[in-house]
Image (tube, helix red, strand yellow):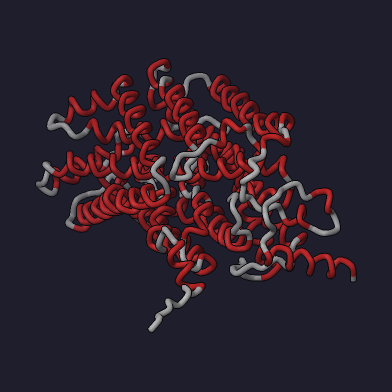
Amino acid sequence: MTTTTAAPTKKQKIAKAATISVFGLAMLNIVAVLSLRGLPAVAEYGMGSIFYYVLAAVLFLVPTALVAAELATGWPEKGGVFRWVGEAFGYRWALVAMFMLVLEVTIWFPTALTFGGVAIAYVGPDRAADAALAGNSLFILGVVLGAYWLATFVALKGAKAFSRVAKWGGVIGTLVPGGILIVLGFAYVMTGNKPQIDISWSAVIPDFSNFSNIVLAASIFLFYAGMEMNAIHVKDVENPTKSYPLAVFIASVGTVVVFVLGALAVAFIVPHKNINLVQSLLTAYNDLFVWAHIPWAGPVIAVALAIGVFAGIVTWISGPSSGLLVVAKAGNLPKFFQRTNKHGMGTNIMLIQAALVSVLAILFIVLPSVQSVYQILSQLTVILYLVMYLLMFAAVLRLRKTQPNRPRPYHVPGGTVGIWIIAGVGFVGSVIAMAFSFIPPGQIKVGSPVLYVGLLVVLSVILVAIPFLVFHLKKAKWRDPNSDFAPFTWEAESGHPSRVTHSAKVPEEVQKASNKEQAHAGK
């Protein structure tokens, strides 16, 4: 008697191919977006931090999450933001968007790891010695370099490895410490202790008379950045058209709650005049632990925070670098940048990025103030990232017009009016945040204001010019013949056969959508 094995169903094939769960993707997004290191900057506003966080969520987080969900599920082919902007505006601007993402995250790594170094410094038993170590540039440099190269090694192990690190590292190093901070901070006030801020409802509306105070608040917009970054993994989850928006929703709600309550907890315990962007979070934990009679917990939470930073770095190394690898293989970067390991990760891209991060990290020794360098680099990442967001918001509007029949499993609600309101709010909010980013903040000593602004302008212009130069030098021989980067819809249109420059197969649903649009245009 012969037995036969039934062929796997479509659902079984998808489940087998899926390497990231909904919870895993949500954690990737939370780890990418949520960072406790930014809480002291917002804690300076006291109850006003509620206003700023909610405003930034309405003007930036919600539009970003909704727009990214439509773009990621409507254009799930490889490429991420490169795909979305390229569909709308072509290769030149697609390269700008992709390079802004990679360049800003490269510059951001030393600033994020600086916080990790500070966390490690507070593991010791002597608080004064810990604070001194946290201000030691050589120590910070050692932590930045060691942690980044270790994170690169983990990211090179592939999607399963970095997804696992992000999930558990996010829980241990972000969610648990965030929960402890919130519980202890509010318990401190509710048990009768006097908070360091006015907690009346009238204090929720900030003082807009001091313009310099608003400048640092503009950076809150970018505290919510990164929700679109993991769209590169949209095909790594089962049923992505439903799973991706769900993961984004879970991550968005969790992020807002932790940010708002966490900033208030810091403001309750640390006097306004003593708030320091780099060290105040650890100071808040130590003060709360002393109040709760568990001073031994200080070093434990410091290690946990360092783990959270490490998980975030792994996530941000893998996401943009994977996207850049896809872009490179599609013929947009020389062959050197297309080399991969057995896990399919871009080895040369990651190693070059690691070298650049190492060079940037040395700035923490050359320049006298860690905090001033921290602020300049942070603002530069804000500016570059906002360039990408402006292109993303503009792309979703253009694609509603140029590809109206494209299958979109998830639509930004409200039809044409809805998309213009949501994307328009995100675009205008990004423009305002970018303008404020060039103004020196009043809370931080950055040296000469003219030099500060001049550095930001010059560096921004140079970095934005790089993708235009790459596009100008682009050669046909750069394309990997085995690239699975599907051609853009406008390339695949039968009415423009000369524009199809790729050998990759056009997805069936894309071709159908293109045919429908041509038929519609011919009426």
The residue shown at (70%, 52%) is 487
Locate residue 361: give its quadrant: top left
Q: Is residue 398 above or below residue 139?
A: below
Foreground residue, 318 or 292? 318
Foreground residue, 338 or 114? 338
Image location of residue 195, percent across then percent down: 26, 48
Image location of residue 146, percent across then percent down: 32, 29
Residue at the outermost left position? 293
The residue shown at (32%, 25%) is 140
Q: Can residue 207 be seen in this view?
A: no
Locate residue 423: give its quadrant: bottom right
Q: Is residue 180 visible?
A: yes
Locate residue 186: give its quadrant: bottom left
Image location of residue 214, percent across then percent down: 51, 41
Residue at the outermost front position? 1
In the displayed structure, does residue 438 sit left or right of residue 424?
Answer: left
Q: Is residue 453 above or below residue 394?
A: above
Foreground residue, 336 or 264? 336
Image location of residue 54, percent across then percent down: 47, 56
